[in-house]
């Protein structure tokens, strides 16, 4: 019986030790700046190469923009392949993440997005509203505004000439 008493006395001593809750790790602050995929699209768009930009050159440009390329290597490769499958980039050479890439032709993507919007709105024809919405969805910021204004100018000029 004498042996059981110290074990019973030790159990209540442990209970108060568990009651203080562990401090949660501080949440990581969100990094400001563009995502990897937006940086990739911007870098490829800046390229003047006719046959596209190679993956090595793309990583060199991203390194110059402040991205740690060795740390983000896997994310860069997956972002490039996702952009190719999504249709933002077209691959001129190679397969997968390796090879050369250039910006895809926009009119095909805009037309397919506009037809998707028309189908969603249960319309049989594509209106200028769907085309403008598709342009705003697919093109980044200021470029979308410029494209919409130029498109409306062209339509106005065409209709006034008839």
Image (spheres, rainbow, N blue to C red):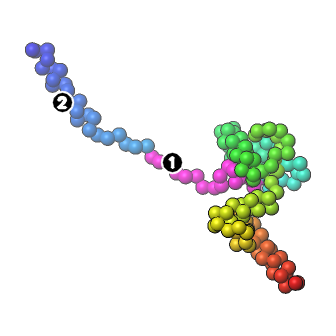
Q: Where residue 126 sits: x, y (%)?
A: 73, 68
Element type at mark 1: loop
Name the outermost residue toward the right.
50
Disc 1 or 2, which lies upstream in sequence?
2
Can you say whether 66 is above or below 9 in the image?
A: below
Element type at mark 2: helix
Q: Which residue has dot 2 on it? A: 12
Where is the N terminus found, in terms of image quarters? top left
Q: Which residue has dot 1 on it? A: 28
Q: Residue at x 82, y 57 (%)?
A: 105
Where is the C terminus found, in terms of image quarters? bottom right
Q: Is residue 8 visible?
A: yes
Q: Of 126 and 102, which appears nearest the observer? A: 126
User: For the residue carrying disc 2, how many other residues have a C-alpha within 10 Å: few (<14), some (14-19), or many (20+)?
Assistant: few
The magenta segment is: 26-43
Q: Residue at x 27, y 35 (%)?
A: 18
Name the outermost residue toward the left.
1
Q: Quadrant of residue 143?
A: bottom right
In the image, 25: left or right of 52? Answer: left
Q: Where residue 150 sits: x, y (%)?
A: 80, 74
> Circles 1 and 2: CB distance less than 8 Å?
no
């Amino acid at each position: 019986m004498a042996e059981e008493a110290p074990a019973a006395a030790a159990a209540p001593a442990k209970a108060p030790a568990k009651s203080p809750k562990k401090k949660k790790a501080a949440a990581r602050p969100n990094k400001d700046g563009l995502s990897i995929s937006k940086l990739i699209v911007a870098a490829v768009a800046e390229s003047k190469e006719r046959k596209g930009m190679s993956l090595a050159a793309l990583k060199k440009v991203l390194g110059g923009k402040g991205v740690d390329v060795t740390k983000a290597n896997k994310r860069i490769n997956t972002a490039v392949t996702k952009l190719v499958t999504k249709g933002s980039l077209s691959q001129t050479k190679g397969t997968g993440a390796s090879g050369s890439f250039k910006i895809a032709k926009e009119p095909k993507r805009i037309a397919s997005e506009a037809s998707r919007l028309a189908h969603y709105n249960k319309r049989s024809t594509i209106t200028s509203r769907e085309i403008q919405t598709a342009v705003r969805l697919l093109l980044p910021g200021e470029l979308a505004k410029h494209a919409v204004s130029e498109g409306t100018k062209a339509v106005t000029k065409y209709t006034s000439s008839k």
